[in-house]
Image: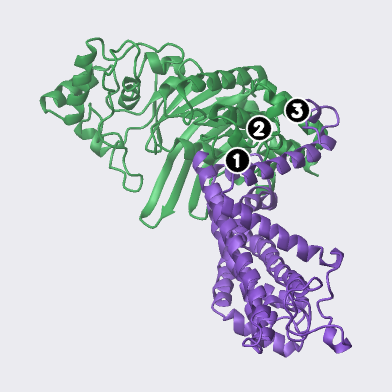
Chain colours: A purple, B green
Amino acid sequence: MSSPSSVTAVGGSATEEEPSASSVGRVSRVLRAFAKMPWLTKLCCLWLMVVILAAALADLIPGLADPNYQGFVFGNGNTNEGPTASHWLGTDNVSRDILARLIYGARVSLIFAFSLAAVGIIVGGTLGSIAGYFRGLLETFLMALVDTWLSFPALIGLVFITTMLGMRNLVVLVLVGAMFIWPSYTRIARATALSVSGQAFVTAARAIGTSRKRILVREIFPNVLPALLAYSLVGLPVLIILESTLSFLGLGVEIPTASWGGMINQARQDLLINIWPAVWPAVTLFMTVYSFNNLADWVRKQAAARSAAI
Amino acid sequence: MAVSEEPTYTSTSSESMGGSEILRVEDLHTSFFLPIGELQAVRGVSFSLKRGRSLGIVGESGSGKSVLARSIMCLNLGSNVKTSGSVFFDGRDLLALPRREMRRLWGTEIAMIFQDPMTSLNPMVKIGRQVTEHLRQHKNVNRRAARQIALDLLNEVRISEAESRIDRLPHELSGGMRQRVSIASALACEPSLLFADEPTTALDVTVQHQILNLLSREQRQRNMTMVMVTHDLGVIAGRTDDTLVMYAGKVVEQASTDEIFEKTQHPYTEALMRSIPRTTHASHTPLAAITGRPPVATHLPAGCAFSLRCPYVQPKCHEEDPPLVSIGTSGHKSACWYPVGSDANREAFERNLSDRLPQTLAVAESLDADQGPGIPAGLPDGGIA
């Protein structure tokens, strides 16, 4: 709303004013950053916003078809249809709406990628910060574990565990993925925590009597976080591709749940008859992954420019 | 429980010394154990400090002055560091104190200001919170009260527009501002002993002056005891009561600051003074640098550690390490076989000059350039201008 005046921010009700004032400031900062992006990055940003919003609000989009509704079974739909008014992107070989399946498929990809990144940041960040700050035997043990774990082929482990469990819904996939995502984050967090621990402000915190636990939470972890966020932004497209690959191989979420890789796999059977059910998810996947990479690159450049300025 | 333990700490030693002694360091040694050998950073330093007084510790890089300050504060963390000797603060031996007790002293009784304000503030934390961090930890001050205290402190250290700066992050402030913030942060719990570890080295000269004046004012107003560690004699000139000159981990000269400037005894102190640029010099006059390098602390020379660079060096200096002995009655101590100003010193200089010893020639050259008496008597306040 109106710009927050600094006078009210320091007035009597300072603590109440603070969060709203800073969140308004943050929004305007984000908008200003957006305005400064190159046009391609702007497009990428817009595309990601469309994908994320559509995936989040899929149930609320008016007129969006049921992604699993097979019209031809009930005599009111065609298989392999071209774009029509009711099916904007046409239908697949079992007459399901491709647009609806794309949108619900985005949900699977994004939930998978974002939850794994979150697990990596939280678990890996905590373990890595502890190892990098407290050092000692704990660090030796933890890093040995990380090295061992990283040498284990994650894809095979993923397939093995989901097969043994006999179920492959999204929750299971995320949980199994989490088992393999934390080591790389732990490594990065530890390396960052090591360099942060050597900084004067950590010594300064000790010199005012801060406990080691509090230093870890208030001094080390907040300074490790940016590195992890940067890493996770680069890692997101990789995770999206991983999920699509698994689905394409039939090892992702169980059918008929829509997923991009699954859609391509399904369309593969009739590729010579109708190529579009494969093209749409492939293009969507490409654009999404490209957008994440482009954005990550831009963020990296901004961070580099800023640290150079400081 | 903690309160009931309090009286047992006030040992008799401080009372017998007149009750005003706040810090006494006895034979403090600190060594780092490195792959290349033992690095003796501090080698048997002893001194005592009375409440409300200020002490300057001077020495060049690597002389052990910062390690000394950190050893006294028990901040030399690391598995390869060994500290021995004793440090009595208010009668209790800090080196023997359990970590939990030490943590209560840190910040509330003893505080420290660090050299580089660029790195001594957490880049992710707003300055208001940095200033009151320990208040909220140690004294259970709530958020709103802490904010008010932070404002008062920021105003006290002369940060203009404190109301708007309190919510800034450190990188949004200038270096001088940041050092003011770290001073405010050190003062927040009203410590009785303040260490300033090269508080102005990373700052512009004009800002240096302001920060030093701020520190002196706070020290006087709060009747705080202050230890100022610096490599710049100009910084302590006219600002501290006493001065300790360190070289290669040892105290080489110790006296009141006025006396150090007026009756310099140790060749190293003299060399330090000679290397201060003067406004009376013509511009572009080369600085009288001390020839050679400080000794590598893992491989110290036999005898006096300064012997390799000393213009007055004699065979005896290479063989025997001179002890720190009192000169006169005013508490002036110096560790030199041929103290500056003595006849023995003059003879040594002449002898070295005729032997064409490089460091002696360098000194003679700078004396010629000066065309005046060797050592200027005293320095104006803030001789760094």
Q: Are marks 3 and 1 in contact (CB under 8 Å)?
A: no
Disc 1 marks which residue? A204
Which dot, 3 or 1, sits closer to the camera? 3
Q: Residue at x 80, y 70 (%)?
A: A85
Q: How many residues crowd around disc 1 within 10 Å: few (fewer than 14), some, or many (20 or more)? A: many
Displayed quadrant of residue B261: top left
Query: Label for residue B185?
Result: 2
Cα–Cα gap, marks 3 and 1 = 30 Å
Q: Is residue B229 left or right of residue A259?
A: left
Q: Is residue B272 above or below residue B94?
A: above
Which of pointers 3 and 1 lies earlier in the amino acid sequence?
A: 3
Q: Secondary structure at mark 1?
A: helix
Question: Which quarter of the rendered picture does the N terminus of chain B lie within?
Answer: top right
Q: Position of residue B372 (x, y in %)?
A: 24, 9
Cα–Cα gap, marks 2 and 1 = 10 Å
Chain letter for the residue marked with disc 2 in the picture: B
Q: Amino acid at mark 2?
A: Ser
Q: Secondary structure at mark 3?
A: helix
Q: Amino acid at mark 3?
A: Ser
Towards the viewer: B207 or A94:
A94
Cα–Cα gap, marks 2 and 3 = 23 Å
Q: Residue at x 84, y 75 (%)?
A: A66
Q: Is residue A136 visible?
A: yes
Q: Are marks 2 and 1 in contact (CB under 8 Å)?
A: yes
Query: Label for residue A6?
Result: 3
